[in-house]
Image (cartoon, grey):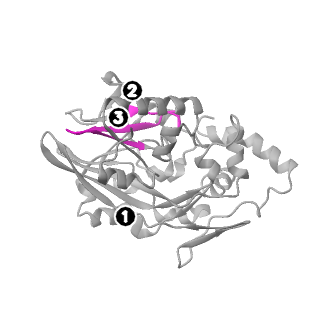
Amino acid sequence: MERRKFIGDTAKLTALALVSSTFINEKLFASNSSLSEQNLLTIKNNESMIISANYQNVTTTVKLKGKDVKIHALCTGTVAVKTNFRRKKGIGELAKLNILLDKNYTEFLPIWVWVIEHPEGLIVIDTGENAEIKDLDKYLAKESSFIRYQFKHACKFNIDPKDELNYQFEKVNLKLDDVKLVALTHMHLDHTDGLKFFPKQEIIVGDYEFNHPNNNMPSTFPSWFKPNKVVYKQNRIEVFNDAYPITASEDLLYIPTPGHTLGHSSIVFKTDDFDIIFAGDSSYNQEQVLSGELAGVHADYKKAQQTYFNLTEYAKRRKTIYLPTHDENAGHRLANKVFLV
C-alpha cells in the first residue's frame, strides 16, 4: 500500500472523475511524445508551446580545508510536468486529482546530477534519467496500466542517449569507474535511472525512504540494486539535528528533508566559506521555499512545510547555496555563489 501512496491517494478520486465527467478523456490529456526538430512540442487543447531549453553543465571550485574542490552540475535531459504537479492547487488530496485534470505543462526543466571531486573520492548525488524513458509504455511495461496512465499524463521527458550520465562524465573528463559513492535523495525514477552506470559502487539511500517508498517504479531498478540503507544519527547538525555522515571528515552530511516523499533526504556540503544543500525534490525551485509554495505532487504537505522552514532557518545561520534537482537557475547559483537568504 505504501509503495503506491500517491496512486492510492488519487485512485478513488480519479475513478469518480472518469465516471462522472465525460470530458476527462484522451483529448484532455496530452500523451508523451518526442520533440520536433525545432525542439518544440505542442500540447493538445493548449495552443502554447513547450520549449525545450538547453541547460549547460556547470563546473565550479570551492575551498575545503584550504584546497580546491570541483563541483559539477550535469544536466541529464529535461522534463516538463503539469503546472499543478509543480504548484499545489486545491485542498488536501484533491490537489493530486488536479494534477490529472490540469491541461497545462511547465517549461522543460533540467534534471541535474551533482558530482563532487571530494578528497575522499568522487561522489555522485542522484543519477538522472536515461533515454529509455521516451517510450514509457515499454519502459514501464512491468508496472500497472493505471500507474503508466497517471505517469504519462503528469510529465513529459526529453532525453537523448547523449544526455545520459556516461556522456556527461566524458564532457568534464571524469570516469564512471572512479566514482566512490552514489547518494540518492529519494527513489523516483528521474533520480535513479542512471543507477545502471554504478553496479560496483556503494549506493546509499535513507532507510525510511527505502522501506516506505512513494510512487517509485521498482521495475526500473537494476536487478542488482541493493543500496546501503542509512539511518540518521542524532545531534550532528544545526536545525535538522539528525544527519548521516557521508564522509569521514563529516563535511558531507545526509539530512532529513521529508515532504516530497516520506523519507526524502538532502545532502549538505560544508565548504570553508559556505554550505551547499543538494536538495533533490525538496522543492522544484528556490522561490518555492522562500514563498512557501508547495508542489502538488508532494506526499506530505505538512512535512514539506516543515522542511521549507528548516531550510530557511539553516540558511539564516549559515551561508547556504540551495540546489534542487529541477531548478532552472541552480547551475547559475552554484557558479555565482548565490545564497538562499
The residue type indicated by label 2 comes to: Phe
Asked if one can make out residue 128 in the rendered structure from this viewpoint, the answer is no
Contact flag, marks 1 and 2 (Cβ < 8 Å): no
Residue 221 higher or lower than 208, as above or below: below
Lower sequence index among marks 1 and 2: 1
The residue type indicated by label 1 comes to: Gln
Q: Position of residue 183 (x, y in %)?
A: 35, 43
C-alpha span from label 2 to label 3: 10 Å
- For image coordinates 42% across by 54% down, the residue present is 329
Answer with the quarter of the image where residue 253 lies: top left
Answer with the quarter of the image where residue 196 lies: bottom left
Answer with the quarter of the image where residue 298 lies: top right
Q: Which residue is mark 1?
A: 56
Q: Position of residue 103 (x, y in %)?
A: 70, 58
Mark 3 vs mark 1: in front: 1
Q: Secondary structure at mark 2?
A: loop
Q: What is the residue that sits farthest to the bottom in this orientation?
A: 37
Mark 2 vs mark 3: in front: 2
Quadrant occupied by the N terminus? top right
Quadrant occupied by the C terminus? top left
Q: Secondary structure at mark 1?
A: loop
Instruction: Tell me which segment is drawn in magenta.
Output: 254-279
Q: Which residue is mark 3?
A: 254
Residue 261 counted in the magenta span: yes
The residue closer to the viewer here, 49 or 159, is 49
Q: Position of residue 17 (x, y in %)?
A: 81, 47
Q: Which residue is mark 2?
A: 240
- For image coordinates 45% across by 33% down, the residue present is 257
Q: Position of residue 202 (x, y in %)?
A: 31, 44
Lower sequence index among marks 2 and 3: 2
